[in-house]
């Protein structure tokens, strides 16, 4: 009967190799039959008020700037700690 534990199933270990060049077709996503993107109208996705759009863009830019600054600070702190450890090891054990 074979090994049947921990999820391995019989059809897996009794598989036979396929014939070379045996045209297995891959299933498509069906996007060819769908409506082209330029004709799609998804309601509620666009911001129609220019002032609100500007505020949204400014808010996102400020968030991105803060994230970038925090990433820089953490990277510099990590680099400083790493350099400190390397210098300590060199001074302590090599010299």
Image: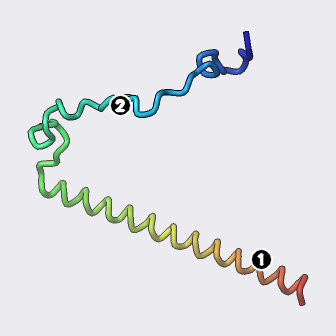
User: What percent of the width, then of the height, locates residue 23?
Assistant: 36, 30
User: What percent of the width, then of the height, locates residue 53?
Assistant: 18, 55
Q: Secondary structure at mark 2?
A: loop
Q: Which residue is mark 1?
A: 85
Q: Nearer the viewer, residue 90 or 52?
A: 90
Q: State how the image is colored.
A: rainbow
Q: Residue furthest bottom?
A: 95
Q: Secondary structure at mark 1?
A: helix
The number of callouts visible is 2
Identified at 38% across, 63% down, the residue is 64
User: What percent of the width, then of the height, locates residue 58?
Assistant: 27, 63
Of discs 2 and 1, which sits in the foreground?
2
Whether label 2 touches label 1, CB < 8 Å? no
Q: Which mark is residue 4?
A: none
Earlier in the chain: of badge 2 and badge 1, it is 2
Q: Nearer the viewer, residue 65 or 83?
A: 83
Identified at 73% across, 9% down, the residue is 1
Q: Nearer the viewer, residue 15 or 50?
A: 15
From this view, report whether residue 55 is shown above or below residue 72: above
Q: Which residue is mark 2?
A: 26
């Amino acid at each position: 009967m074979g090994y049947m534990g921990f999820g391995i199933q019989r059809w897996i270990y009794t598989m036979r190799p396929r014939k070379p060049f045996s045209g297995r077709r891959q299933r498509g996503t069906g996007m060819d039959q769908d409506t082209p993107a330029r004709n799609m109208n998804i309601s509620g996705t666009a911001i129609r008020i220019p002032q609100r759009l500007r505020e949204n863009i400014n808010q996102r830019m400020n968030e991105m700037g803060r994230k970038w600054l925090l990433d820089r600070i953490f990277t510099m702190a990590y680099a400083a700690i790493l350099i400190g450890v390397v210098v300590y090891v060199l001074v302590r054990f090599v010299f």
